[in-house]
Image (spheres, rainbow, N blue to C red):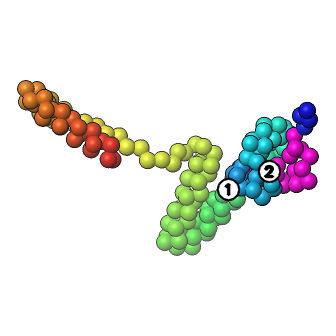
Amino acid sequence: MDLRCSLCQHTEKEAINKALLEGESFRSIAKRYGTSAATLVRHKKHLPVVMLKAQEAGEVAQADGLLAQVDELRTKAWSLLNAAEQVGDLRTALAGIREARSCLELLGKLAGELQDGNNVNIIMSPQWIEIRTVILKTLEPYPEALLALSSAWDEGENSR
């Protein structure tokens, strides 16, 4: 029984490896190169470690390049801001401040120092808690009504 990987012997091995490393779907790769998704899954498990490290190094280099470009934009924004301030052009200086702030914000996000997300804090007022308690106590003798109210609250929670 031959235990060699058929894709390691494939004439398009480099292109297949590249497609796998780029995250292309197994199905589309299999269709393009006349193989099966299962074969691709097995092949990906033993891709050379060097190729994986090369991909990671490329991603790091790309990220470093992006950081350098944003840093360059930040430097230009500061320079233009200073020039506008020197000539007394306050409107342009204000625009420069906005651009410099945007660059600093982007640098912070890229460096992982700033999070971009929506946080919602819900604080229940003491009045709401009191009203809820009164409603629930009032409905205790009426289990069907209590159940209906509970279901309505659950539906309201799930629809958000």
| Image location of residue 94, percent across then percent down | 50, 66
Q: Main secondary structure of the magenta part?
A: helix
Element under label 2?
Answer: loop
Judging by the rendered image, the residue that carries numbered circle 2 is 35
Query: At 92% across and 35% down in the image, what residue appears?
Result: 2
Residue 7 on image: x %, y %: 86, 46
Q: Quadrant of residue 72?
A: bottom right
Task: Report the span colored magenta.
Answer: 5-23
Q: Residue at x 63, y 45 (%)?
A: 111
Tag 2 and tag 1, C-beta contact below 8 Å: no
Can residue 64 be spotted in the picture? no
- Residue 118 in view, yes or no: yes
Look at the numbered disc 1 and give the secondary structure of its residue: helix
Query: Residue flagged by tag 2: what amino acid is it?
Result: Thr
Q: Which residue is mark 1?
A: 71
As for residue 123 lying within the magenta part, the answer is no
Question: Which amino acid is tagged 1?
Answer: Asp
* Residue 8 coordinates in the image, percent (x, y): 89, 44
Q: Residue at x 59, y 48 (%)?
A: 108
Does the segment drawn in magenta span residue 15?
Answer: yes
**Residue found 12% across the figure and 35% down from its top:** 145
